[in-house]
Each structure stands twice: as structure tokens, then as C-alpha cells.
Image (cartoon, coloured by chain):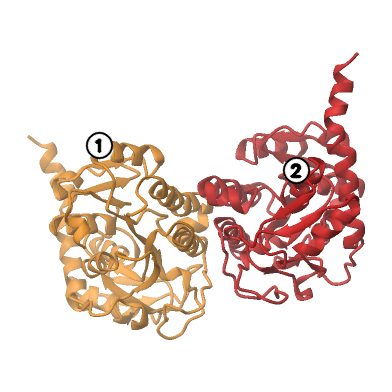
Chain colours: A red, B orange
Amino acid sequence: MAQLKEAKPVWVTGAGGFIGLHLSRFLAGVGHHVLGFGRSEAPGFAAATGGAFFSGGVTARTMDAALASHGRPAAVYHLAGGATVGQSIADPLKDFEQSVVSAACVLDFLRRHAPDASVVLASSAAVYGGGHFGPIRVDAALDPYSPYGYHKRMVEELGRSYCAAYGQLVSVARLFSVYGEGLRKQLLWDLCGMLAAGETDIVLGGTGTEMRDWHHVSDVVRLIHRILPAGEPRFTVYNGGAGAPASVSTISRMVLEAWGGNHRLSFSGKSRRGDPVNLISDPSGVPEGLQLQVPLSRGIAGYVDWYRAEILAEPVGHLRRSAP
Amino acid sequence: MAQLKEAKPVWVTGAGGFIGLHLSRFLAGVGHHVLGFGRSEAPGFAAATGGAFFSGGVTARTMDAALASHGRPAAVYHLAGGATVGQSIADPLKDFEQSVVSAACVLDFLRRHAPDASVVLASSAAVYGGGHFGPIRVDAALDPYSPYGYHKRMVEELGRSYCAAYGQLVSVARLFSVYGEGLRKQLLWDLCGMLAAGETDIVLGGTGTEMRDWHHVSDVVRLIHRILPAGEPRFTVYNGGAGAPASVSTISRMVLEAWGGNHRLSFSGKSRRGDPVNLISDPSGVPEGLQLQVPLSRGIAGYVDWYRAEILAEPVGHLRRSAP
């Protein structure tokens, strides 16, 4: 990591997103000069990190601007990509452009302007597909189950190609079910929305027995930071899982408990397209010695607290700001 | 094939290229209404096929124009892509755009406008990589050895993804060493160029023992036509090989013999980057019952004849046209 202590900036793409914002804050917290890239403006970025933010996506234009104003990056954390499996099915070309084309642009920009920069590419457990029933080893067969998964796999292949042909240092993090404060989609978000709306009879899709590897964003961010490659050119894939599997039903009950009150929980039995039964990380691909710091119970309680404090307060805060 | 006998056109992308022109002529010859797409103008296309040509690459704009003027395609032969391994190493982003982005654009256009169209994607034996020493089965491990190979693999993955998610009918042809009249690059072209320049001491790169699966373009075109998928949605990969392996040394001597005269042939022993030792197709992945019609000796002699008639005559023809 020594090279990162110099004045060279580190870049985070997708820096306006859930994980990107957490990672940018973390990197700034350990002393890095962080530059963020994102499709839309991220008004709080500068205040949270002390760094600059480039909107308009991660393109030759925005990277040229960052290079001209701040010099070559020492490291690039490429988190930009499509948003969800569902959106990738609805508009696969958009997902392809956001995931695969953006990765090609970043890797090629570095080949030309910063060949020594280390790269972490965010991938997803979606590359494994739905055919796995136990913990998934990092060398398991890949059989993506949606355009989202196929595109993440292509992002990995681009990293492998640039490492093989040009010696770029590239690590891949296959992220599982990342959750935490700031996540505004998926199960926890939907569930809190129902609870906030006063629903007492909560009905969720699927069977509730689907197993996921829940991984708090603060632990994910430490993992992403930890796997930054250094030294000899190499291409390494890591499982970004917590190794703390829990069923959708278990997680949902933890949310209800943290929220308080009396609710009935049931499952429709109807699965969403592209939703595999199990996605659990085998410890084989998780970086050694990286201890989980946020256990599930605390993480879920923290999420519910955040939702109540930030999201439920939003309209009130807005009224307060509007009123003199 | 019955559906192709209707008025619906068939599309050929990369139609201005070596294989694309041969395929377009073949398809026109068996009665199809052929529309070609290519980056540059292809002046002889209309005369050779009776169909229209859309220059400017295969993009939403050119496909919209073809759709508006000729209706939905029944079949698309997607041959557009990067040119060579060497160019992909020199400019990988350009190769990525020409191969991967163009495939994504075609597949997504069909998803939206012609979901019943059958698709053949041209891939390459480069996806197998250099670690194979005997004939390569179509289910062999893929380990591309250049950006060109990685990108062709991504093209295949896009086809698999669109078939899985949207039921598109997709076949892949992994082409080996395609040669024949019109090929203006690679070994045969370079060798004829040396002979035409009057060189008598011919020195080639490599050792001469590299084995390739030489496949005459007229046989390749019949293979591509034959594997067009029909019926149920499926994704199938074929080895587009001839199963007629010969060493670079053997082929070179055949060229010298066809050319005539006395020449000395030697090899520098220095390999080009990204050049595998052996790329030979196992018959397992070749469509059944497709007999090779052009044996190597005849194919090589035909190439030399073409080179002398067309290429050596070019400046003369040019002078003739220029002079009154």
C-alpha cells in the first residue's frame, strides 16, 4: 500500500452509489485523496471525502478531466455498473453499457495513461448462477442467470485480458448480498417501506427459504480495500462474501423484530425471474485474516435505525427546511 | 430454411470484409434478399448480390434504416468484428468496440424488433488459446491468448445471454484459419507479396511447425449457412474447422510450388506475440454431413491464381483505366 501514501489520487467509479459512497468515505478516512466518478451529481461527495466528483459517467472525457487536474491515479476501484438484475432483464443494452463498456473504458484509459495503477473490479455472485446448493467456491463453474450476471462476467474477462496482455494489476471482488445504511433497494428497503406504510400483514415474494450471504457494507469496503493488488502483475478473483448465510425469512424476521410491533409475515411462493435459490460464499475465496466486524443482528438493527432516522425523517426535514 | 424463402431479407454484418463478401454472394446465389452492413462503402456489393449495403458500421442508425426500407430480417449473420490479433493488441478498445459492442447492438436490436430472427455469430478458434496440442474439441476449456480472443469469447457470451433471457436462436461458428480469394492479410498474402516482389530468399517468422486448420472460404460459407438455427430457442457452438491440418511450412511450400520458380524458404524461429503453436479443430464440433469441397492443394493453387490475376494486375488495370 506504500505507493498510495503519495500524493497520487485514488479513483472510485460509481462513487455516487451505495457501496461507492461508503468506499469513498473509507478511503478518505485512511488518508487517500479520493476522486469520484458517477452518472449523476453527488452533492455530498466533496463534503464527505474532501475530494472532487466527476459527473457524466466514467468516460474518456471525465477521466481526461481528472487526469489533467489531479494527475495519474495510483489505484482505481471500479464500482460503476448496472443497478439490478431486474433492470438488466428490462434493458440489457443499457446494463451492458453501464457495466461492460465502462470497464473497457477504464481499463483502456489506464493502459494508456497509468499502466502502473492497481485496479479492483466489482463483480457479483450473479456470475455463479442459480445451480449451486452449498457454499460456492471461488473456482466454481460460472453459469450466470441474467444479463446482469453475464455482463459482470464480461467485466471480469476484460480485467483478465488486460492483465495478460499489458501486465495490469487487477483484482476482482465477487460481491454477494451487500446491505447497510444508504441502500435504497432490495429486500431490506422494500420491507422497511411496508412497515413505514403501516402494513401489518407483510407478504413477500419467493418462499423465504432462499439463502443469501449477507455482508455489511462496512465489511465489504474493508475487503475491497484489502484486495487492491500490488507488486507483480496478476489477476486474482475474490469471493466478497461474509460467510454468514441466512434465509430471507430469517432476515425478514430480524427486521420486524428491530422495527417492533406486531406483524404477520408470509411468502407468496412465487419467485422473481432470475432469482437463484442459494447464493452463499465459501470461505475459500475470501481474503485471509479479514474478520467480519458487523454481525448480522447488529447490521440489521443499524439499517432499521438508519431507515427511521433518515428516510422517515426526510419529508419532515423537508418541511422544516421549507418553513421559515 | 423455409422461412428464409419469404420476402424477408437476411442481414450480413461485416459484409464488406473477406468472409462477409463471400457469404453475401453465396446467400444471394441461393435466392436470398441480402442486406449488407459494413464500416466503409463496399462498391461491388450491390452488383454482386442484388442487395443494398449500409455503411457506417452496424449501429442503431444503420439497422433502423434497413428495417424501415426492407422490413424485419429473417436471419442475421454477424461477421463484423476486429480485424486481427495484432491490431487487438495495439488498440484493444477499438477491437472491443468493433467486436463486442457491435454484437451487443445487433442482439439488442433483434430483441426489440425481430425476436424471431435466427442469428449466427462469427467467433474464432482464438477463444481456445494456445495451450492445446492436439485437435480441439468444441467443449474444450477456453483460455484466450489475446484481446481479440477475449473479445470473441465475450461475443459468444452475449449470444448465450440473449438466448437464455429472451429465447433468441443463436449459433456460434468458431472459425479457424479461413483462406481463399479476396484475403488480403496473413500468411498467404504476405508470402505472395514477397514472391511478387521478386524475393528468392523467403524468411518467415515462427518455426514453420505451427499447425493450423486451413479452411477454404467457400467451405466456411457453406458451414455458416448450414448452422443457422431454426425451431426451438437454443444456443449452439460449432467448430468452424476443416479438420485438414497442415503446418505453416507445408502450406508455404505449397504456395511456392504453385507460384513456380526457385526459392529458398526458412524460418526465423521468432514467434509473434499471441501466436499459439497449434490450432486444429476436432471434428466433434463441426456440423455433421458437411463435406469439405475444396482440398488444400486446390485451394492454395486457386489463391495464387487469384493473387496473380487480381492483385498483380491491379496497377496495370489502374493505368489502363487512367489512360484514355
Residue at (16%, 56%) from the top-left corner? B5
**Closer-to-camera residue (A146/A58):** A146
Judged from this view, the residue extending furthest toward the left is B324
Mark carried by residue B69: 1
**Closer-to-camera residue (B247/A276):** A276
| A183 up-or-down from A209: above or below | above
Crowding around mark 1 (Cα neighbors within 10 Å: few <14, some 14 to 19, many 20+) is few
Crowding around mark 2 (Cα neighbors within 10 Å: few <14, some 14 to 19, many 20+) is many
Q: Chain of mark 2?
A: A
Q: Under tag 1, what secondary structure?
A: helix
| A306 up-or-down from A178: above or below | above
The amino acid pointed to by label 2 is Ala
Whether marks 2 and 1 lie on the same chain: no
Q: Give coordinates of residue A92: x percent, y percent.
A: 52, 50
Asked if one can make out residue B312 in the rendered structure from this viewpoint, the answer is: no
Marks 2 and 1, how far apart in space? 44 Å
| A38 up-or-down from A255: above or below | above
Q: Give coordinates of residue A274: x percent, y percent.
A: 58, 60
Indicate the quadrant where residue A238 lies: bottom right
Asked if one can make out residue A322 in the rendered structure from this viewpoint, the answer is: yes
Q: Under tag 2, what secondary structure?
A: loop
**Closer-to-camera residue (B146/B72):** B72
Residue at (39%, 82%) from the top-left corner? B209
The amino acid pointed to by label 1 is Ser
Disc tally is 2
| A51 up-or-down from A217: above or below | above
Residue at (87%, 48%) from the top-left corner? A304
| Residue corresponding to mark 2 | A15
Residue at (65%, 34%) from the top-left corner? A56
